Amino acid sequence: MTHTFRFYYARAPLFLIPFLSLLLSLSLFLPISCSRSPHNGKSLTVFCGAGLNKAATELGRVFEKEHGISVQYNFGGSHNLLAQIQLVKKGDVFIPGEDYYLKIASDKGLIESSREITPHIPVIAVPKGNPKHIASLEDLGDENTRIGLGDPQGTAIGKTTLEILKKNNLELSIKKNVVTYTTTVNELVAFLGLKQIDAAVIWEDNALSARDTVDFIAIPGNMNIIGTIRAGILTLSTQKHEAKLFIDFLSSPKAKRILERYGFKTF
């Protein structure tokens, strides 16, 4: 019998899910701007993975200050962002949480060019103090351990987590403990902080940004699958020169210092 992960909330006793889901759905259609008004009438629309929101917002502000071009973000799950790009047929830059989604976009003829920005490293995250004493991926299968995972059909972290579990033959032993699949990694961080789940697999940068409420355990290199974040210029863009300025800025020394401050590694 083939076992696969499915997106559902039925088992989850998490009272915040309806409200978070509503906010996330609305956010797909409400761009977040780094300024109140575009300079010189120029503004880039950037579809960006939700887990990158803190660093991306600061990067947008610094870019605008240097180039006079504002950045409006649509944050969300990588799969949903790709679907939105195909639906609205406009936008300038796509920055999913994992390179896989940029490759899909490229195969669909949506990417003009792209640039590597940063590695994306999965870790095991637990509530502050690690009350369940979790030390490894295998421990996620222990009895009475509540696990939260990203939706593998909609999020970069969910897809990567499923690949990690399959790689280590842990999918079945951990699946029985999963109480919720979320539409963004940020929801997992929130549930950990509220101690509504005992562990989750999230990105290292998200864990470091939430260090006041979350601890994390590194996954050994031979068991892990390291992702890559790339920024791609959309073929739909009518501002390709400005879009190139932005993705070039994202790999600049100044941008790397900002990314490192938010817990990202850089190339």
Image (cartoon, rainbow, N blue to C red):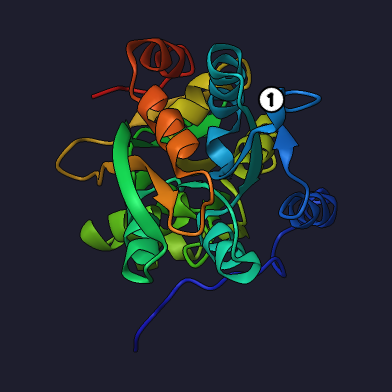
Compared to residue 255, the image places residue 54 above or below, namely below
SS class of the residue under badge 1?
Answer: helix
Compared to residue 105, the image places residue 57 above or below, namely above
Is 266 in front, or is 42?
A: 42
Tell me the kind of residue under disc 1. Asn
The image shows residue 233 at horizontal and vertical percentages of 42, 47
- On the question of residue 34 being in view, the answer is no
209 to the left or right of 41: left
Determine the residue positioned at 38% across, 48% down: 98
Determine the residue positioned at 46% across, 13% down: 258
Classify the position of the N terminus by image quarter: bottom left
The image shows residue 133 at horizontal and vertical percentages of 46, 30
The image shows residue 149 at horizontal and vertical percentages of 52, 53
Determine the residue positioned at 53% across, 21% down: 59
The image shows residue 72 at horizontal and vertical percentages of 67, 37
Taking the view exactly as shown, the residue that stands out farthest to the front is 40
Determine the residue positioned at 62% across, 18% down: 61
Residue holding disc 1: 40
99 to the left or right of 184: left
